[in-house]
Image: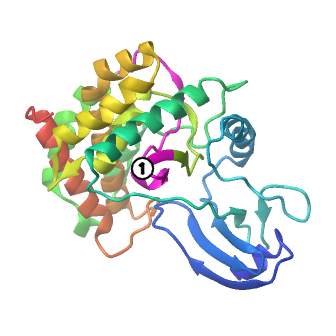
Amino acid sequence: MDAALICRQYTDHEILSVTAFGGGHINDTFLAVTDGGRYVLQRLQPRMYVDALVYGYRLWSKVFCENGWLCPIWLTDKDGGYIYTDPDGDRWRMYPFIDGDILSSPLTRDELYACGQGIARIHMMLGSLDERPQAVYPRLHDLGWYYDRYQQILCSGRICEENRDRDIEGYIRSCIHRHLAYVPSSVAVVHGDMKLANMLFRDGRMVGSLDHDTVMPGSRAEDVADCIRSCCISDGMPDLPSAKALLKGYTDTASHDAADEVMREISAAFGKICFELALRYYTDAISQEGHFKESYPGCRLERARALITVCDHIKRGSV
């Protein structure tokens, strides 16, 4: 389907160009330039539970806007809905482009501190929602489910043998029970994908966030750990001083209970998040299911190996 035709479902402005945009691993994202401004157009991942997506959007967009937090504000299509389904069955959404800076690693200590402050603010705002959102991806961060799925694929006989790595499989077997043993002490509404690419900054402060499809009940420690994973890894090893700067920003800003919980659980949560993502990338590589987009041949397998390396440093006491 022509992306420009999709844009016309949301705006009457003249479409000047529509180009691929961003580096997301799930949705296909485009930047639409019109004579009335710039917009982000996204083709949604087919596995999304759309009713939960729209329900959650109404909750988080309200509280973010009330607090002056920048976030995507979805447009409605010509039929008055947020999600447009094209003749091919693909589902789309569109929102105005948000001006802001997205930082890239390595970050300064001040920038890391600002990341921690921003995550704490998000947690406090999501803690004030009128209702709890439903999970758009019900199994997200369910390590037991991902491991069962991995085992099913190994036993199915329908796998890509050239992508198999017996060292990775041995590591998974030796570590799975340790990571399954980690159970968060509480459940709160969290972002669910708190990586650097989803943070918006202005003048050194975090002022907004993107990609809220994963907002759901979950672990605050895992949310913080996921951000540490995205911006505090150097040469394949966890960068402890960077992680401490980010955590300082979080604990200085979050509620006392949230700060204490995150500091108690951050080591176990970080190990679990890295292991879980390695398992998901490896499962994707050997099954060729294509949940994660592959920007070049072997990308998913390479990501799995890199995350296993991080996990190994954690196991040996590097964090």
Which quadrant would residue 148 be assigned to in this image? Answer: top left
Is the residue marked by circle 1 packed among few (<14), some (14-19), or many (20+) residues within 10 Å? some
Where does the image place residue 177, in percent across and percent down from the top left? Answer: 25, 28
Question: For the point 53% across and 59% down, which residue is it?
Answer: 100
Question: For the point 38% across and 29% down, which residue is it?
Answer: 250
* Quadrant of the frame with the C terminus: top left
Q: Is mark 1 on a helix, strand or loop?
A: loop
Question: For the point 49% across and 68% down, which residue is it?
Answer: 22
Amino acid residing under circle 1 = Gly
Q: Which residue in the protein does label 1 denote?
A: 204
Where does the image place residue 32, in percent across and percent down from the top left? Answer: 67, 76
Residue 191, visible in the rendered structure: yes
Q: In this view, does 294 lie above or below 257?
A: below
Q: What stretch is highlighted in magenta?
A: 183-206
Residue 148, visible in the rendered structure: no
Q: Which residue lies furthest to the left in this view?
A: 316
